[in-house]
Image (cartoon, rainbow, N blue to C red):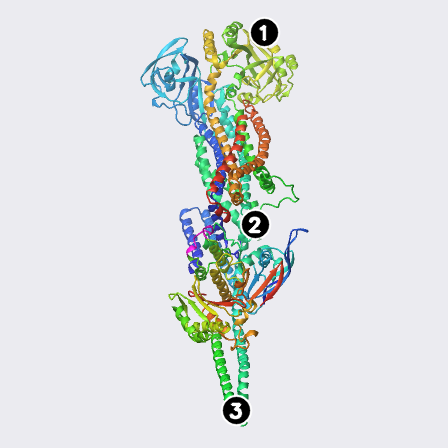
Amino acid sequence: MNILQTTNLTKYYGEEPVQVKALDGITLAVEQGSFTAIVGTSGSGKSTLLHMLGGLDTPTGGSVMVDGQELCRMKRSELTIFRRRKIGFVFQNYNLIPNLTVYDNIVLPVELDGRSVDISYFHEITAVLGLSDKLQRKPNKLSGGQQQRAAIARALITKPAILLTDEPTGNLDSHTSQEVIGLLQAAGKKFHQTIVMITHNDEIAQIADRIIRIEDGRLAESRW
Amino acid sequence: MKVYKYALPGAGILLSATGCILAFTQIPESVGRAVLLIILLLFGILDMGYYFYFRRKFIDFSEEVCCHAERIMRNEEDRTQHNQETLVSKVVMELEKMDEVMQSRLSESSREKENLQKIISDTAHQVKTPLTSIRMYHDMLSDPDTDVNEKERFMDIIRQQLEKLEFLIDSLIKSSRLENDMIRLNMENSSVFHTLEISLNGMITKAERKKIDITIHCNPAVKVMHDAKWTAEALGNILDNAVKYTPERGNIRIDVIPGEMYVEIKIQDTGKGIAAGSYNDIFKRFYREASVSKEEGLGLGLYISRNIISLQGGYIMVHSVPGQGSSFSIFLPNRKNI
Amino acid sequence: MKLDANNNSRIIYRIAKSNLTSRRLYTFFSILTIILSVTFITAAVLFLQGTMTAERRMLENMQQVMFMNVSGEQMEAAAADERTELMIPYKESGIDSTAGSVKYTFNYLKSQAEGIQTYVPVEGREPEAYHEIVVNKGFMDRIGQECRIGAKILLDVQGGVQEEFVICGYIDRPYDLSVYSIYVSREYADTSPLMADKKYTALLRITGAAHMESSGFETAVYQMAMDYGVKRPDVNINGRFEQSLQESNVSLYAAGLVSLFILAVSGIVIYSIFYLSVISRTQQIGQLQTIGMTQRQIKKMVRREGFLLSSISLPAALILGGIIAYFLQPDGWSFSNYAVTAVTMSIFGVLTVQISVGKPASLAAKVPPIEAARNSDSGEDTKKGAKAHKRLTAFVMAQTGQEQNHRKRRLMSISIASGGIIFMIAASYLYAWDEEAYSREGEFAGAEYIVSYLYSAHSPAAYGSTEMQLVGHLSGELREKLLKIPHVRSVNAVNSAFGNIEYQGASWVQGFYRLTKEEAKSFNMNMDGNSSYDYLCEHDGIIITDSEFISGINGVSFQPGDMLTLHWFDGEEHQTELEITAVTSETMPAHSEYNICMTDKTMEKLWGAMNTVSSFSIAAKDYEKYGEQIEQDILTVIEPYPDLSLETLREKRIDDSANIQKIKIQIYGISVFVTLFSILNLINMLAGNIAARKKEFSILESIGMEEKQIRGMLFWESVIFVLPALLIIFTAGSAAGYAVVSFLQKSAGYMEYRFPLIPGMVYIIGMVLIPLTISYFGLKGQSRVPLVERIRNTEL
């Protein structure tokens, strides 16, 4: 079953003659439970594509279907709740809430839904990510790598059906990167999660089941 | 909780009773009494009313949830409860999520069955070739016209083919066992260096024959939770490949790097390398690159290695520059992982 | 809230709380603003209530009506009546004596603490024996004598005769008086040559009066008077008591209006605070939306912040308001009033905050989640169209920065302007006040001394002061003498004849004011009937002013066209009929103590050549310098004439001073508050602005912009939004101030609009200095953190 599907997805910024074509007619499908890597040079449109898949931005043309639902047809509140329950997003700039502690940041999506945190799972993730002793700190007291790991923990805590990650290892050394990728893959397998990861690192990309290449807003060859 | 169930109506009845008593004792005037009594009675009724109302709501809620659970089992789709800011929506979406995970596990197991079938057919296919060879040469042996020298040669070939068959059956059994988790892994926190030694034992002679230099950088104190025997087997397969595909006077370098979450065992060689596009392919069963078809091998080594390492919660990554060499990194998890 | 709604409220509350605690400065200023406005309103309302309560309490200890010119028997009879709740006898000697420069008079007054508060000796007791007296300690101090029980004192009684008295007790009033009372015993009042033939005044409280309607009370009182043979003109109803029965709510409505206005202004200020706060955290809001916070939850979060701010500010404000009101009006303090006001103010306060927070809350909700991915400070969209390249001076940077956010800028201007307008109104009020003008209201409008015939309503003559006019001490001769006094500028004679009026069954002694043709021309009051001078002369007509007052006292109702009978005396008794040609309820400007006018021609006709002078108004040259001397001289000149008395502006000011004190405190209090309000508002906005743009400044600094240059840019920015604000303040504010003063002038003629120049200048200087100071300290504070950290970390 294809859990993510785009049809002729386009996103333009500005007007002619200074128009920027971030995405130029992208059609792709991602199978449920798979681990897909999206690679491309900077400015190729990878982040924009991910934002579209997560319903954060509206396309200029084409459509995005997630879990059988067309995102543009959904009401804004429904889309937000959909994101809350079904998607875990890891941003390039982490996007942690600066005035909350790391603990609060990680469990935020769970609490926004009025649920109680799965404490054993929480401890598992934070232990693997090496955050157990930093839970009461505020984000501005963490290094870039630690913030990134906190963002990853936040994305995992609700066991969402889809994980959209934008350069999740961008600020990590190669060693930690490997470990984090492994964590994503293992978690994905256990809860049958679909993982889409943007990376510019070919080595990291190998671990995926499938690599999608984007250049200038268009798909290049795709490999299995 | 039983406390809540009785608290509200109980409190209400108590209050009404107290009120009644107070009313009777304090207010002598009969009209005033009657009025107060009526008021208190109303309160009491309201109280009971509230209790029954909320009880009904609870029951309705549980009925709605059961209804949805049954619908999910029938595989019927219903999007009305999706993405709403309600308690029912929350529960229903969680039920559906659980259903998906269950389904995927089910399909996983059916996929495994398929896999098994594939193994059997692959095996049968692979077995056929040496068998045909043996039969042919056996027939030729039985022919009285064959001379002694030829017979000797034929016996050699048959022996070779039998060895091949043995090796094939062995590997197949191993891989199938690994596939079906029939192997009991004996996980122990033991020295990586020791495991390396075991793995090197198998191929050290072959390496020496090709004059390949092997260097090991490993802190003897590094320990990790793993099954020494099986891991050694996995490492051995990789080392085997390294020796096989590295030319004479090449180098093989082994580094053991402990990390926060994993211990990395890096095996680098100066062999012919692997094209980037084939990184995933090489771990597939019976895969052999076209360029190495004349070399010995069944294409099962890396497949088995990956399975062994995966079973232990780790993974293998490869990086290679064709013509210069390859590097295989085996990651074993530090603690009890997911 | 439906039963089925998702239970995710608690996290919103936590995030809201965390938002407030992490932005300390902004929270602090917001709380301060709310506290200030609510405190002001609470204090104002409580003060008004307190004034009313104080009045009520005072009236509870005052007489409700006086029956004048009664005999001892009438008094006792009235006291025994069941309609009388309490009766206190009072008798004046009617004669002022002096001891040096201190005036005093003998009175008999029963000592009473409750009901009708007269006096209670601090030490000692009420006088019983003939020569026992109770004195005022202040009086003893001023005449330089020891105030001791048992001390003997020689006092001038009448016409040079002295008597020895024994002090049996004394009172201590904290303020000076122009004339001190010396309380004598009943025996003295009944038998002494000074007071024996004077009449009593009975001070009465009527049973159940507080619950009567004003007209009902009047009827009851006049009925009682009739029962005991007290003539209608001798019935003196306590005007304040009567007014309290009428329960005019005008002042309460005024307070309500002012409060609403203040609340509205505070609402604007709070709105701008929240608006700025939301604009500066679009990234945070976008982030929250990406992890699943719906628009409704975001609105709730902002509203929760507002609610949390109120819950801290309101209790503090209510307590503060209560304390201030208590100090302004301690007599009027009442806990039940306070409780009701506190509850009402809380509700209004919470409502105001919620309403002001509403729009910014929806604005926050509209932020799209994609903001999370943006890194720059999102202003509004820049104007389209390419701009010619300009040199990037601080001014230009300020300008371009401002264009990006003209909504923000407009908001800041409006909220500062609102505070400033209130400031201008308060300053105008303050400047319009003139203490001297206050005291000069009425007879001292053009003069500082009034020499008049000593006529007292307590010892009435049938024709008023006519007897004394016939003696004629206020003569042309005297006038000459007075003119000769050095530094006297002018001596004006006020002519007024007296007679007895009979009309509609009532009769009373009335003074008539002499109206000249010139004066008649400048009459422009609202009158019923014909008020032209010629008509008056022809028909011997009179004009009734302050008609309601006279009607009330005498129980008549004046109709234009009616005739009334006048008995007068000029050596012989005469009688004639006069026509009431015009009636008005207004009072005559500058001569409000006279209320019926007749033309000079008519007066001449009736009284002929009789000297109708009733008083001399004396004006001084250089009053400040020579006032006291002139006063002494006048006293010397009139000394030979015992039927003349002198009233001075100086004495009136003393009497007025206590009252003025109170009003002054109010004025200063209001001004201080409003100034604080404006300043805090400005500081809040500036500090918030600087804090929100921390990253921008850091980046500018990293590419080489000096702190001084950044300050320059901030200065020009603040000029750009302060300038329009100042314009509005000085135009609308002056207009508003003028309007308020004009409105007040109607009831308080001593107020005159003067443009508050000095406060205005100070305000302008403040508006310039404060931004400079804030940017200086704000930037200094930021520079304590190393540049790298400032740029790296996301805004708080």
- Amino acid type of disc 3? Leu
Q: CA distance from mark 3 to mark 1?
A: 178 Å
Location of the N terminus of chain B by quadrant is bottom left
Q: Which picture quadrant has residue A129? A: bottom left
Tell me which numbered mark, 1 or 2, is placed earlier along the sequence. Answer: 2
Q: Secondary structure at mark 2?
A: helix
Tags 1 and 2 both on a single chain: yes
Chain of the residue displaying label 2: C
Q: Residue under circle 3?
A: B141
Per the rendering, the mark at residue C365 is: 2
Left or right for B196, reference C301:
left
Single out the residue that lies furthest toward the bottom.
B144
- Specify few, some or many for label 1: CA neighbours under 10 Å numbering under 14, 14-19, or 20 or more: few
Chain of the residue displaying label 1: C
Task: Looking at the picture, tell me which residue is in the foreground, C150 or C463.
Answer: C150
Bounds of the magenta span?
Answer: A133-142
Determine whether C150 is above or below A219 in the image: above
